[in-house]
Image: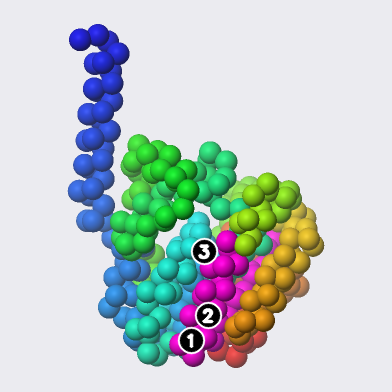
């Protein structure tokens, strides 16, 4: 047996052992995906306000200040496809539901990690794996995410760092990360991504479906674009904001949507309330929750 075959067999064995370790250990880890899925399965009918979206809604708003019977189902780095799927699954069973609050970030409609640079493909693989494993929601789109899935198994530690922080589902960030003004900042050219037009239409399709589901179940659908720090706003383009507003108006021609854009809101200009360039810290998240509660009369 030559050296090449031996190395190939060794690699296959290592990968198989890693896979078995992940499959055995993952169900025994109380991470935010499994926690949130179980919470919804056991408590959906009790929830009055459901929060959906990605890290802007998991990290940058304090659900404890939004009223009673609130649950934060948002997950960091989530593509809107999963929010639509989760809402479709649970809303028929949520007899007490009055509000769905969804966070629409500035850059999200222009790209998604399934079609992005290599460093983001790993994120998409991780998201696909976790949603499929713990929430039984596979992604049926392009196969690029399988690259990230493979790399996700190699970096096993990354699969176990999503511990649930709060019983209500939020994950507030304390203080400010070093180099915060550059951390999680945005490329000003993101709105000119070559696939942006198609991805905007895909994003809007999911958003429209969420609006439809809320309308059909007599639930108020609230969409908010969170505030961003001054270093982030420098890279925001009015053209991109116009796309966001345009999507909302198109959906409003079919279904009710309450929307507010907080991107440049004057209340959120202080550097001290940001954990990084695009996410509020715990102080800012509390300020934002109180503002949303007031603006929408929750």
Question: Residue 216 — which label?
Answer: 1
Classify residue 117 as left or right of residue 40.
right
Which of the pair 144/76 is nearer the observer?
144
Indicate the quadrant where residue 279 lies: bottom right
Badge 2: how crowded within 10 Å, few (<14), some, or many (20+)?
many
The CA distance from mark 2 to mark 1 is 6 Å
In the displayed structure, would residue 230 be above or below residue 155? below
Residue at (27% x, 78% y) in the render = 42
User: Range of the magenta residues?
Assistant: 202-231
Contact between marks 2 and 1 (CB within 8 A): the answer is yes
| Residue on which the image places disc 2 | 212
Give SS at disc 1.
helix
Residue 59 seen anywhere in this rendered image of the structure: no
In the displayed structure, would residue 200 be above or below residue 120? below
| Residue on which the image places disc 3 | 80
The stretch drawn in magenta includes residue 213: yes
Residue at (33% x, 63% y) in the render = 135
The CA distance from mark 3 to mark 2 is 15 Å
Classify residue 89 as left or right of residue 117.
left
């Amino acid at each position: 047996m030559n050296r090449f075959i031996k190395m190939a067999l060794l690699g296959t064995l290592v990968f198989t052992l890693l896979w078995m370790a992940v499959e055995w250990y993952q169900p025994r880890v109380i991470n935010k995906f499994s926690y949130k899925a179980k919470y919804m399965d056991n408590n959906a009918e009790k929830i009055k306000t459901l929060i959906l979206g990605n890290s802007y809604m998991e990290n940058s708003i304090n659900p404890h200040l939004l009223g009673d019977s609130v649950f934060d189902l948002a997950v960091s780095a989530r593509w809107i496809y999963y929010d639509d799927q989760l809402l479709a699954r649970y809303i028929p069973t949520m007899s007490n539901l009055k509000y769905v609050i969804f966070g629409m970030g500035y850059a999200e409609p222009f790209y998604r990690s399934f079609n992005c640079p290599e460093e983001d493909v790993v994120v998409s693989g991780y998201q696909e794996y976790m949603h499929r494993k713990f929430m039984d929601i596979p992604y049926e789109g392009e196969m690029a995410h399988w690259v990230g899935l493979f790399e996700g198994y190699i970096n096993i530690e990354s699969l176990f760092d999503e511990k649930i922080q709060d019983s209500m589902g939020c994950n507030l960030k304390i203080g400010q990360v070093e180099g915060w003004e550059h951390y999680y900042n945005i490329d000003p050219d993101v709105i000119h991504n070559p696939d942006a037009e198609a991805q905007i239409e895909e994003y809007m399709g999911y958003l429209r479906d969420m609006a439809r589901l809320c309308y059909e179940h007599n639930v108020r659908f609230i969409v908010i674009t969170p505030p961003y720090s001054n270093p982030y706003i420098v890279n925001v383009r009015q053209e991109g904001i116009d796309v966001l507003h345009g999507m909302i108006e198109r959906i409003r021609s079919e279904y009710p949507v309450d929307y507010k854009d907080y991107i440049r809101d004057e209340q959120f200009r202080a550097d001290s309330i940001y954990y990084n360039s695009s996410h509020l810290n715990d102080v800012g998240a509390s300020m934002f929750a109180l503002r949303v509660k007031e603006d929408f009369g929750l």
